[in-house]
Amino acid sequence: MDGPEGGAAVAAEGFGVKGPRGWAFRGVDVDAAPGSLIAVAGPSGSGRTCLLLALTGRMRSAEGTATVGGLRLPKQMPAVRRISALAHVPGVTDLDPAFTVAEHLRERALLQRRFDGSLRGLLRPRSERVAAAKLRIDTALTAAGLDLDTLPKGSRTAVRDLERVEALRLSLALALIGRPLLIGVDDTDLKLADAERAEVWNQLRSVAAAGTTVVAVCSEAPDEADVVVSTAPPRATAPNDTEKETADALAEARRA
């Protein structure tokens, strides 16, 4: 497995996912070094979200081979889930509009400490645990480019009051709290102006450069991408069937 300083290498050959209604995608090849920015480009309904979920261990592949950080898919899906995280995936990582930014961050830090903390860590004095959680949150916010001081009410700003790019940055920060080797980001350019789109891709490029491999779904790949993977509906599968496969995959990802 690749080390945290280099992210996870991603490799796939003839990779495909098939559900009850047909192929979501197939014949996908990927060869990306650790710390790469991988753009999954294609029109809505082309299976791009299914590919994102498959590469992060949330959806079982049906053909081809793939490895993430040296872990084989689909055989080692649980292990891949442990080293990866998702951000901005509708139906999976939705933010609670009534929660404040601080509440989201605090909740994620508590969950992270519960699931990956050692017994010794859990028994540390409360002051040390609070300081460690704050450091992890601050590091994630910096990596995601979210400055709380610029928000209308600072950390007390409700999610419903965030701009679209700010919400994406918050979702990215929440995923980064877990210090994943691979992070999958969906709909990176949905309803964004050109300047906002460039801002988001620059931030994802920065995350990858810092050592976390990024797989980002988009309608059009940017120049910043190290690797571009294109998706398109297989001829035997109607676009609306592919969208249904994606909906099924999202339900499965929530359970995972």
Image (cartoon, helix red, strand yellow):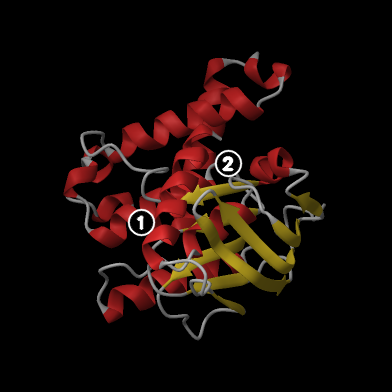
Compared to 188, does 112 lie above or below?
Answer: above
Residue at position x 21%, y 42% in the image: 157
Where does residue 64 sit, x and y in percent of width and height?
Answer: 75, 63
37 and 73: which is toward the camera: 73
- Dot 1, how many residues are within 10 Å of its Cα: few (below 14), some (14-19), or many (20+)? many
Residue at position x 40%, y 37% in the image: 105
Where does residue 252 sit, x and y in percent of width and height?
Answer: 51, 39
Question: Which kind of residue does numbered mark 1 sit on?
Answer: Leu
Question: Which kind of residue does numbered mark 2 sit on?
Answer: Gly
Measure how far apart labels 2 and 1 are at the Cα level: 17 Å
> Which picture quadrant has residue 51?
bottom right
**Extreme-front residue of the structure:** 236
Image side of residue 239 versus residue 18, left or right? left
Label 2 belongs to which residue?
178
**Label 2 element class:** loop
**Label 1 element class:** helix
Image side of residue 102 versus residue 47, left or right? left
**In this view of the protein, can residue 190 be seen by the observer?**
yes
Residue at position x 45%, y 68% in the image: 46
Residue at position x 24%, y 43% in the image: 159
Image side of residue 7 versus residue 230, left or right? right
Where does residue 168 sit, x and y in percent of width and height?
Answer: 35, 56
Compared to 39, does 249 lie above or below?
Answer: above
139 and 46: which is toward the camera: 46
Where does residue 233 sit, x and y in percent of width and height?
Answer: 48, 71
Label 1 belongs to which residue?
168
**In this view of the protein, can residue 8 be seen by the observer?**
no
Q: Are marks 2 and 1 in contact (CB under 8 Å)?
A: no
